[in-house]
Amino acid sequence: MIHDGDWHINRHTHSSYEFHFIASGGCSVVLDDGEFEAKEGEFYLTAPGVFHEQRSIGDGKMVEYCINCDINLTDDAPSEEKFILEILRDTPCRSFKDAHGSIELFNRALEEAYYQHAGYYTNIKSLATMIITAASRAMSESVPIRYSVPLKNRKSDYRIEQIEKFIDDNISNAITVGDVAKYMHLSEKQVLRIVREAKGTSVKDLIVKSKFQKARELLRETDLSLKQISDMLGFSSEYYFNQFFKREEGYPPGCFRYNTQKPNV
């Protein structure tokens, strides 16, 4: 919004949250119970139901950036989102110093919208969240945090996830402990320890389990021949695949497919 000269926006309210960032100039904000000025480098928030009007001051020149947004919680449990919403809902309407750079973030969003390079829409969505978060910080400098955030996985959890993903992604190869160790930039001994502690089994058994589960999936959900499945899972021949599957399942892959595939209607 760009204003100049003597201007006035009549008393009104919103059912949503409206942020007003003063990029240059300033204005007088009149509430039902008071009045304050918002100047360059400051901002104010009008929460739902807050009646307000704006009046020019000085020469009337002002550039204002606004974000109007509906914010609703889907879960009432303590969370970062709930904490921020409480700040926006409960903080009295007044001017705040833009101490955490919302206006600069808004400028970046405007540049994204103007130039429209690849990914600009995604960047604007991210910047909008950052703008609101930065404003919330400025409004709550002395408010203690009253929530906890999900902790990152422990290093061992992350490593076993990476090991399992590597095995799944390379299920068609004859994977060895050495292959896993090289991928993880660890020693074979470290890999063996991580798998043992996380899964209570060996790397070899983890690979066998992954091949077996993939074999069951392919037999049940595809019409690939046994030879094709054998090749996809890295077996040297269909015979060895049959022997492997029978050992793990208790009966041959052909019988498993017959008993589990849904008949065509």
Image (tube, grey):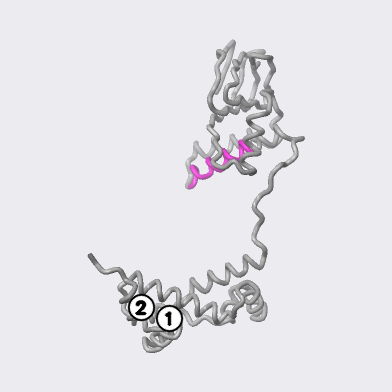
Instruction: In the rendered view, tell whether residue 206 sits above or below residue 11.
Output: below
Which numbered disc covers residue 249? 1
Query: For mark 2, what is the residue?
Result: 256
Foreground of the two, 108 or 154: 154
Is the C terminus in the top left, top right, bottom left or bottom right quadrant?
bottom left
Boundaries of the magenta span: 119-133
Three-letter code for the amino acid on which mark 2 is drawn:
Phe
The image position of residue 206, as x and y in percent, is 54, 77
The image position of residue 152, as x and y in percent, is 65, 57
Q: What residue appears at the point 62 percent right and 65 percent down from the top-left corner?
A: 158
Identify the element where label 1 is drawn: helix
The answer to the question of whether label 1 and label 2 lie on touching residues, with beta carbons closer than 8 A, is yes
Is the N terminus in the top left, top right, bottom left or bottom right quadrant?
top right
Q: Residues within 10 Å of mark 1 (few under 14, many from 20)?
A: few
Asked where in the image residue 29 lies, by quadrant, the reply is: top right
Foreground of the two, 173 or 213: 213
Q: What residue appears at the point 57 percent right and 18 percent down from the top-left corner?
A: 3
State how far apart marks 1 and 2 are (Cα). Answer: 8 Å
